[in-house]
Amino acid sequence: MADVHVQGVTKSFGETVAVGDLDLQIKDGEFVVLLGPTGAGKTTTLRLIAGLERPDSGTIHVGGRDATALSPAERDTAFVFQQYSLYPHLSVFDNLAFPLRSPARRFPEEAIRRRVEEVARMVRIDHKLNNRSTRLSGGEMQRVAIGRALVRKPAIYLMDEPLSSLDAKLRADLRLELKRIQAELGATMLYVTHDQIEAMTMADRIGILSDGVLVQIGTPRAIYSEPANLHVAARLGQPAINLLPAGLLPDGGAPTGTTTIGARTEHLSIEKAANGHADGVVDWVEHLGDQNHLHVTVGAKKLVTLTDPDTSLEKGDRVTIRYRSPLYFGSDGQRLM
Amino acid sequence: MSLTTAHSVVAPSANSKRIAGAIVVGYALISIVPLLWIFATSFKTPPDSIAYPPKIVFQPSLEGYCNLFTTRTRQTPEYINALGPATGLCDATVRKRNMVIAGPSNFLPRFVNSLIIAFGSTFCAVFLGTLSAYGFSRFKVPLADDLLFFILSTRFMPPIAVAIPIYLMYRELGLSDTALGMILLYTAVNVSLAVWLLKGFIDEIPREYEEAAMIDGYTRLQAFWRTVLPQATTGIAATAIFCLIFAWNEYAFAALLTSGTAQTAPPFIPTIIGEGGQDWPAVAAGTTIFLVPILVFTILLRKQLLRGITFGAVRK
């Protein structure tokens, strides 16, 4: 295990800048998640660190060593791909043993067997070691793919949306397992996803990527409650943050220059209008069982917030809405104090 | 439509199955009858083979096969009677026609030439084709599209159109009537097919497999060998069959460029002359034996071939 330091790395494909002037430091044993939409440069960042792409400029250090010009094999990283992760012509055992059998390593077969069995237990696939890798369920395949990265002890594990092709239940299970394994091993991990729940639950630090630029990096808490700009604010929170023009609702205390106010559930207090004055009308109450989504129309805007499952609000109710220290954004999209 | 007779709109009806079956059987008969005719002729005696009306039922004889593998000379009955007992089945057969076996014919060496040249050129074409297809599939090759078009363009005209330049070239280079020359020629013709066919197959193998292997400490060549090749076997087998069939059956160049030591079976078989005309049973016997290797090879690889064709990756 070792730290990874990406400095000023830029990578373009033709006209498109996939990653622009990226600085990223991952400390030994840290779990960093890169969050961003498709095309934000997440995968390119991983591929640059793995050596599958060469940066146009900038340097990449792995474990204190300049790895910028090294081949993938020399970099000591492990990569879990989103898809196509298993060799279809090999058994589960041979898939797991594949990295250890590299001609560059030459481990004795006995040591390989012990290591493979150990890892198979860790990812809970030890009962299917002799199966053909094509005869596994999606969850099992992804477990093997993760296991294949774990058989080695590389400087850093790079994971490219390893859970995105799985169904929700499996994803939740594997998310927990992955976090447990990472903590057990004290592994350094760079994990890429567009799923905010994965980011929030697993990361020590989250980096938000947008159009190849690292917009903000920090603890999940900081990213959530102190987003640097509108883009970051919009990436986290369920339901998504409400972005309202200044002046739509009474916003005493807004700093000068505020053009947009970001309000999540915890930033809003909504009550049934007592008399005369009302700010909005309940549009719809969406029952999700353990909680409800409350849709409110305010002027030409719509708000969505969470509300108690036993809320007394109903469609057509007129409500008053007040901010409770929301997030203020200026005309450039940056958050104001 | 009544509710009780609901039927699938995608499954073929019994009637259309019957019609399809009839068409297939009819086509198979038309294709197979000439083969059966040759097979039957190979077991006829020379008089039976030219009998009119043709004999459907006949006394089978191995005379065609004997004549195929031997050369014979005519002798007087007195000479033959003085020889003592026949030394084998063929000896006995030819003696009935007042002939004795003078020695082996050229069929076996020609057949061996065919094997060497066809399999040799198939190996070369598939080997070169696999590597080039991989290169075109994975790397940014400058002018890749133009190069691929150029490679394909070698098949735009019938190969025989360049027969005369090739003939002169081969004579100058001393490649005329050599196995090496024929292997080079067939490889050159087949390699374009191999590149295009295999590129289709390799394009469909996700590059993540090699990338994963390279991150795991393999070189590109090792990754190619351990991850791409095993998954490309279907395409390689299908390509090999196509190349082999071409090289095995090729007649025009073989007739033009080989005459002696490197002659292949296709130009040799029609030249089998019997006494007083073409020895049809021997020709049929040669053709029958000639069909065997390609049949065996295709049957061995038929699973791959079928998968290759249904893969949607066969681009000609």
Image (cartoon, grey):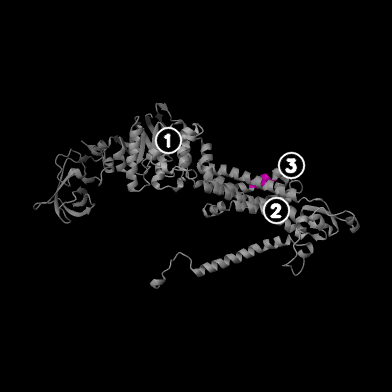
Q: Position of residue A216 (x, y in %)?
A: 30, 36
Observer-nearest of A313 and A217: A313
Closer to viewer: mark 1 or mark 2: 1
Left/right placement of residue B250 relative to residue A132 reads right
How many numbered markers are drawn? 3
Closer to viewer: mark 1 or mark 3: 1
Q: Which kind of residue does numbered mark 2 sit on?
A: Tyr
Quarter of the image where one finds residue B276: bottom right
Query: Which chain contains the residue that carries disc 1?
Result: A
For the residues tagged 2 and 3, is the chain the same? yes
Q: Is residue A12 visible?
A: no
Which secondary structure dominates the residues rendered in magenta?
helix
Location of the N terminus of chain B (image quadrant): bottom left
Inter-mark Cα distance, 1 to 2:
57 Å
Q: Helix, strand or loop at disc 1?
A: loop
> Residue A294: which numbered mark, if any?
none
Residue matched to label 1: A151
As drawn, A197 above or below B9: above
Quarter of the image where one finds residue B123: top right
